[in-house]
């Protein structure tokens, strides 16, 4: 399965947090799954760390490329098609980072690993 991690899932994975569901932990740990991390998550982590909203995410903010590589996760760039789809999404989610993740999941036909139930309104496959 091709899975993209929502930003909170990525942070919790590296922090070893129990907020990740057992299903989420198993999906990330399953070597049969290909795990993607969006450039939008890197942008979100760096931005929120700089603003003081994610003080415990320093290691990720400083070297997210190395962190992603250490887990054999795959970087997912933001394309013009992703941006166009994110900009055109209607619905309840206003957060631009979330909208990009939803657009990427839809465009790339990936499941999104997130606890955000509101994402279901966009017709994505959500794993949690």
Image (tube, rainbow, N blue to C red):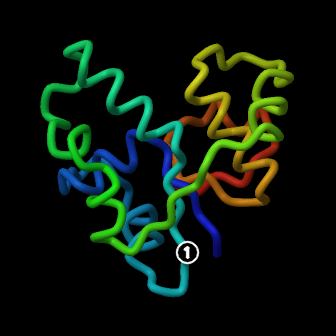
Q: Residue at x 60, y 36 (%)?
A: 117
Q: Residue at x 66, y 19 (%)?
A: 93
| 54 or 81, nearer to the observer | 81
Instruction: Write down the quadrant of residue 2 in the picture.
Output: bottom right
Q: Could you tell me which secondary element the residue under label 1 belongs to?
A: strand
Q: Residues within 10 Å of mark 1 (few under 14, many from 20)?
A: some
Which residue lies under the disc numbered 1? 34
- Counting from the top left corner in percent of width and height, residue 68 is at 35, 61
Residue 75, horizontal then vertical, whole percent: 51, 59
Residue 31 rendering spot, x and y as whole percentages: 45, 85
Q: 64 or 105: which is nearer to us? A: 64
**x, y (%) of residue 58?**
15, 37
Question: Looking at this rendering, what residue extends furthest in the bottom direction?
Answer: 32
Q: Give the left or right position of residue 92, taking residue 49 as reference.
A: right
Please determine whether, in this image, residue 28 is positioned above or below residue 46. Answer: below
- Whether 60 is drawn above or below 52: the answer is below
Taking depth in this image into account, of 2 and 49 the one nearest to the observer is 49
Image position of 8 (left or right of 115): left
What residue is drawn where x is 83% and y is 40%? 81
């Amino acid at each position: 399965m091709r899975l993209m991690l929502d930003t909170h899932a990525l942070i919790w994975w590296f922090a070893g947090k129990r907020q990740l569901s057992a299903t989420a932990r198993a999906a990330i740990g399953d070597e049969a799954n290909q795990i993607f991390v969006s450039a939008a998550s890197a942008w979100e982590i760096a931005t929120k760390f700089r603003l003081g909203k994610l003080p415990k995410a320093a290691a990720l903010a400083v070297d997210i490329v190395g962190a992603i590589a250490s887990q054999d996760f795959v970087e997912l760039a933001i394309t013009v098609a992703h941006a166009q789809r994110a900009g055109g999404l209607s619905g309840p989610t206003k957060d631009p980072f979330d909208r990009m993740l939803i657009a990427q999941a839809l465009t790339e036909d990936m499941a999104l690993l997130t606890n955000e139930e509101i994402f279901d309104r966009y017709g994505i496959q959500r794993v949690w």
